[in-house]
């Protein structure tokens, strides 16, 4: 039977669709089948073709690309397969087929590791297949994925931590132990190429589920991990080994500490260079983790006393033609540096090791010169000036071991004399500023130096001074005087030199490189100190300080703010922001991308006193009020309205502050807020709260402080431009009398504000204005106003006064 023209056309379109699909032209294949579907909607070939294309579209034709690439296809096909794998969710059969292809490849392709790791991470079905492998020994598969690369091994080793893959907790724990044992077995091999891959898995196990491998943490396991702390090991391995050691000590407690002690005793007892290097390396790494235990071992009879003699034997061997171990000296210096965390250890090092350290610090070779000078700085050696000069020289000559020199300067800059010396060295300051961003490993040391240079001496209350005197009297000694080199004028001068060295752009760049809370805290502390001098504000703002501080607060807001450190960072950042925004023109700072409202939100918390502080500190509140007053002067009402909505109740409380400066700043802010209708409503909407606030504002026109009276008068002058506010004043007992008294004030500025208020009152429309005129007549204010005008020399005041008096005739 011959086919119809429609059937022939459908057959032709199906054939074309297959050709396009084979060529990877899926869109053209779809178009051909779509036309065929219109001709014969129920055609089985057309339906099957559409389903096949939809499936290929869903998976990005991943399997075809993968098969082609693993065969002999170009790298571009591997990249396409990887992209498809990252974008699509594979159905179960394709995921299992892909896993089989990747576990049994026909060649060792470059992208094999990325493809395998990505498949395991993204496909639950692939994970389930691999999880079943743990029922049998997995050594062969483990070794295969290690050889393949870090992504494959890491993804496979993560399977025992995925709860969804395990029906039994025992099976899951057993799988974790299997992986842990395999890693430890591999780490025994000193010739292994990438030991850090295994140590990373060990560290993760100890961090995530330590209890499941607690029984495996014996002396042998500890020895394997501790050996990886060797200073000769690659940094990546040492970093993971430090994490693993820290977690192992946490879970094993006294047992782990005892094993560590035995490890050190055994290594030191052998007295070979190799064993001593491993012992000193491990002890140096562990000192910050368990300082009390490590210090006790360090102070064991004979250890520190014999340390230098044993090291000098190493030097004597070199003098006899044998090779001197520079690594042994470096490991010993690392240990001494770490031990300085403990007071008794510092004293012992000073007593038994200082001459040897000073000799090493004279060497030309940078590593030991820097390390020995660092230790001398930490033990607070008497020759601080000499040590500082050596450390500064090491920073200036671009030594590869600059990190230790910078760390040493971080210690010596606790001394005021050293602060002045470093600040006076322009080249050194510039090198330190550059090192902050160019050497991330030195960032903490650089930031410590900058913080030390710019930290102002805390102001002491009368009570604190009295307590110091009593303590000195009890000790039969005079109070130790403050070093004049840390007086405010010296600190400000040092801050100026740092600004000239472009410290602010470096701080901005540094914050992009780190998430360390300690580093961020020092950045904020430095900015807070730099911003104390108002003359610094303009340059700091131009170089990005405002944006940086707001970004830091935003970053803190996304983390746990309950920690004391986070709370301090947030408050200090707000305080620094307040100082910067007191005097700069806000319209030059804020844009659509950096709205002033973000600064308002950051400043408002400072209106509340720091409850964590031992004493109530008013300075942050005062400076925040000044900054908010500046922001409230902007033409855009957004900032003002936000302040009114979120903080007016607190602002009302501050109007009663016993501190004159805080009270004055509060009234000045209220004055600027009267430029918004919502601000007017807070005092003139007829509510009880509004009447109370108006009563307070009227009373503030009669306080002793002129600036406070002036601000209150300014607020009333703006307020009385509104009829409802005039009516509210008229309804207040002695409300009009307060306005008349302002006109009679000795201050020309306050008289001016008073007459503006009266002009607003007498010119109010209708009944309100008539009430105002009657009230002034009844109070016989005419003579008072005439006397005030006789004392005034301001033409504007005279003009306003004449206008009021005419209304009273």
Image (tube, helix red, strand yellow):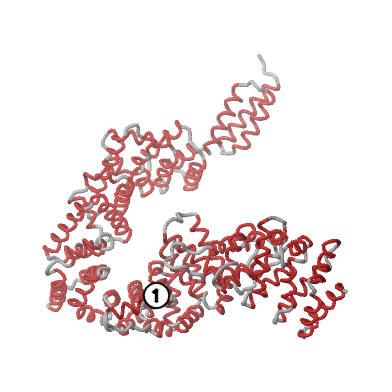
**On the picture, is 480 further left or further right than 571?**
left
Q: Secondary structure at mark 1?
A: helix
Residue 435, how many percent across, how many down? 42, 73
Viewer-side residue, 635 vs 549: 635
Front residue of 6/1: it is 6
Looking at the figure, which quarter contains the C terminus? bottom right
Q: Indicate the position of residue 731 as horizontal and vertical percent values.
A: 75, 62
Q: Quadrant of residue 390?
A: bottom left
| Structural crowding at the residue carrying mark 1, measured as other residues with C-alpha within 10 Å and reported as few (<14), some (14–19) or many (≥20) | few
| Residue at the (36%, 49%) spot, across then down | 150
Residue at image point 39% right, 78% down = 465
Q: Position of residue 583 (x, y in %)?
A: 61, 74
In this image, 422 relative to 527: left or right? left
Q: Quadrant of the N terminus?
A: top right
Percent position of residue 587, x then y = 66, 69
Whether residue 550 sits left or right of residue 668 in the image: it is left
């Amino acid at each position: 039977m011959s086919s119809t023209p429609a059937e022939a056309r459908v057959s032709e379109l199906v054939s074309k669709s297959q050709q396009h699909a084979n060529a990877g032209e899926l869109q053209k294949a779809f178009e051909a089948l779509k036309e065929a579907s219109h001709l014969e909607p129920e055609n089985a070939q057309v339906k099957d073709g559409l389903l096949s294309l939809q499936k290929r579209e869903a998976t990005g034709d991943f399997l075809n690309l993968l098969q082609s690439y693993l065969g002999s296809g170009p790298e571009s096909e591997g990249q396409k397969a990887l992209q498809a794998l990252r974008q699509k969710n594979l159905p179960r059969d394709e995921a299992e087929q892909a896993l089989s292809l990747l576990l049994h490849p026909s060649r060792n392709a470059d992208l094999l590791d990325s493809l395998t790791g990505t498949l395991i991470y993204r496909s639950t079905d692939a994970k389930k297949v691999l999880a079943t492998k743990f029922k049998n020994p997995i050594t062969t598969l483990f070794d295969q994925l290690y050889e393949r690369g870090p992504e494959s091994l890491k993804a496979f080793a993560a399977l025992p931590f995925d709860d969804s893959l395990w029906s039994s907790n025992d099976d899951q724990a057993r799988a974790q132990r299997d992986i842990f044992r395999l890693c430890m077995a591999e780490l025994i091999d000193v010739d292994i190429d990438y030991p850090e891959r295994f140590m990373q898995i060990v560290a993760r196990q100890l961090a995530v589920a330590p209890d499941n491998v607690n029984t495996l943490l014996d002396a042998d396991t500890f020895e394997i991990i501790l050996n990886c702390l060797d200073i000769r090991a690659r940094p990546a391995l040492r970093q993971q080994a430090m994490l693993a050691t820290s977690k192992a000590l946490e879970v094993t407690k006294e047992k782990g500490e005892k094993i560590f002690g035995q490890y050190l005793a055994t290594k030191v007892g052998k007295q070979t260079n190799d064993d001593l290097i491993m012992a000193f390396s491990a002890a140096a790494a562990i000192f910050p983790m368990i300082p009390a235990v490590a210090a006790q071992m360090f102070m064991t009879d004979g250890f520190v006393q014999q340390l230098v003699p044993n090291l000098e034997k190493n030097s004597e061997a070199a003098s006899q033609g044998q090779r001197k171990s520079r690594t042994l000296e470096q490991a010993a210096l690392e240990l001494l540096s770490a031990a300085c965390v403990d007071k008794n250890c510092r004293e012992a090092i000073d007593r038994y090791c200082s001459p040897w350290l000073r000799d090493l610090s004279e060497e030309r070779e940078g590593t030991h010169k820097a390390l020995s000078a660092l230790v001398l700085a930490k033990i607070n050696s008497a020759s601080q000036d000499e040590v500082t000069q050596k450390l500064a020289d090491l920073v200036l000559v671009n030594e590869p071991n600059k990190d230790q020199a910078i760390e040493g300067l971080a210690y010596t800059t606790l001394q005021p004399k050293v602060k002045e010396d470093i600040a006076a060295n322009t080249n050194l300051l510039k090198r330190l500023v550059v090192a902050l961003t160019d050497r991330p490993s030195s960032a903490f040391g650089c930031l410590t130096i900058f913080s030390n240079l710019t930290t102002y001496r805390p102001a002491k209350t009368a009570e604190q001074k009295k307590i110091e005197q009593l303590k000195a009297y009890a000790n039969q000694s005079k109070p130790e005087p403050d070093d004049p080199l840390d007086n405010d004028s010296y600190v400000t001068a040092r801050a100026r030199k740092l600004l000239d060295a472009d410290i602010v752009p470096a701080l901005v760049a540094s914050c992009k490189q780190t998430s360390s809370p300690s580093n961020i805290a020092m950045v904020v502390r430095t900015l807070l100190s730099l911003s104390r001098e108002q003359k610094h504000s303009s340059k700091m703002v131009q170089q990005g300080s405002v944006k940086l501080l707001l970004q830091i607060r935003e970053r803190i807001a996304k983390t746990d703010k309950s920690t004391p450190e986070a709370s301090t960072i947030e408050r200090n950042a707000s305080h620094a922001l307040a100082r910067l925004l007191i005097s700069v023109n806000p319209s030059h700072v804020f844009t659509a991308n950096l709205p002033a409202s973000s600064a308002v939100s950051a400043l408002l918390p400072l209106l509340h006193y720091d409850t964590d502080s031992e004493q109530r500190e008013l300075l942050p509140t005062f400076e925040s009020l000044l900054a908010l007053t500046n922001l409230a002067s902007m033409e855009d009402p957004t900032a003002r309205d936000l302040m009114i909505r979120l903080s007016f109740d607190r602002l009302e409380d501050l109007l009663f502050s016993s501190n004159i400066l805080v009270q004055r700043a509060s009234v000045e802010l209220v004055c600027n807020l009267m430029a918004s209708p919502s601000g007017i409503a807070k005092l003139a909407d007829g509510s009880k709260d509004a009447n109370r606030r108006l009563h307070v504002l009227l009373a503030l026109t009669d306080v002793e402080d002129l600036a406070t009276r002036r601000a209150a008068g300014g607020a009333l002058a703006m307020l009385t431009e509104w009829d409802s506010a005039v009516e509210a004043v008229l309804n207040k007992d002695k409300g009009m009398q307060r306005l008349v008294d302002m006109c009679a004030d000795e201050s020309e500025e306050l008289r001016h504000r008073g007459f503006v208020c009266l002009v607003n009152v007498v010119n109010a429309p209708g009944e309100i204005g008539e009430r105002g005129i009657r009230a002034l007549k009844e109070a016989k204010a005419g003579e008072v106003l005439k006397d005030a005008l006789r004392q005034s020399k301001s033409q504007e005041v005279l003009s306003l006064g004449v206008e009021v008096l005419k209304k009273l005739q």
